[in-house]
Amino acid sequence: MERLDKLLAATGRWSRREVKDLVRQGRVELDGQPAAAADVKIDPAAADIRVDGEALSYSRFTYLMLHKPAGVLSAARDSRQKTVLDLLSPELRRRGLSPVGRLDKDSEGLLLMTNDGAFAQAVTHPSGGISKLYRVTVQPRADESQILKMSSGVVLDDGTKTMPCAINVVTDEPGRTVMEMTLKEGKNREIRRMCEAVGLEVVRLKRNAEGVVKLGMLKPGTYRELTKAEINGLRAAAAKGRAQTRSAALQSKAAERRPRGPVGKSAPKKRK
């Protein structure tokens, strides 16, 4: 059950104070009757809610994909710089959306946004291992040894080592290389730091896909809602990743507990 004022405010079209005024003016109907009070509790899945005769479809959570331009922060708020929230309509900003993960200021491309905390946690948790596809332009030209090092995993400036990743060279010419890189982890500025570790500088970085969600032809600074298939696909990928992580951890523990025989001696034979 949800409070009527909270439910209508969650659509982003009205504040709770405005909802109270609408109810007082008799402009809100529940199942064909004027709403008795703004704080009345209802079942949003079953109730017929109308404002000024217009039927409202209620969705508790919102899921968006945004094409983040370079130069915009992947943050909910910043008093000095433009953030991805500034690219949304006033209605969507009132829904309490936040970025799912992040792209650094100089990077561009696909960024998920939602007000569903459980969904965001599932998608960004390291155990989920949802793959992300990036198009990366570096300078100078990347040679085979540099690409092999990055694909095998490199030690970053903080001493941690990256997981293996898939790298496909798209353009290879004097002075620069364009690569497609698929990663399953999300360390801070990971691709830029990977390239720095092997002597390369990233001049452009764009995320083109995250799991089943693809950027496609979405223009910079614009957004769209995710489809149910995309939402379910991300959830399924995160659940599969968590299951694989748990399975690997259990196998590792089992191997540690397994008794080992004396070094250099074979196990005793059973008597017949």
Image (tube, grey):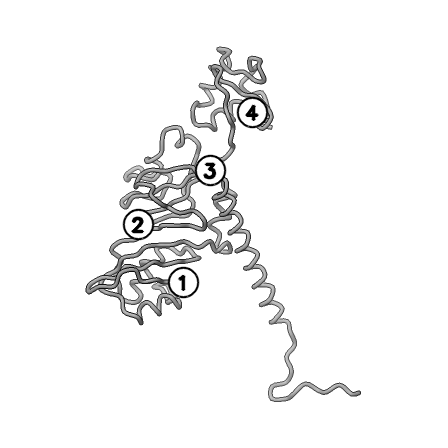
In the picture, measured across the screen, residue 151 lies left or right of residue 118, that is left
Q: Nearer the viewer, mark 4 or mark 2?
A: 2
Q: CA distance from mark 4 to mark 2?
A: 41 Å
The kind of residue on which mark 3 rests is: Asn
Say if mark 1 contacts mark 4, CB within 8 Å: no
User: Which disc, if any, is residue 107?
Assistant: 2
Name the residue tied to disc 1.
Answer: 165
User: Which disc, if any, is residue 3?
Assistant: 4
Asked if 13 appears above or below 175 in the picture, the reply is above
Name the residue tied to disc 3.
Answer: 115
Q: Nearer the viewer, mark 2 or mark 1?
A: 1
The kind of residue on which mark 4 rests is: Arg
Task: Please provide percent x and percent y for residue 146.
Answer: 31, 69
Say if mark 2 contacts mark 1, CB within 8 Å: no
The kind of residue on which mark 1 rests is: Cys
Query: Which residue occupies the foreground of this view, 40 or 26?
Result: 26
In the picture, measured across the screen, residue 151 lies left or right of residue 69, that is right
Q: Residue at x 46, y 20 (%)?
A: 17
Query: Which residue occupies the foreground of this view, 240 or 102?
Result: 240
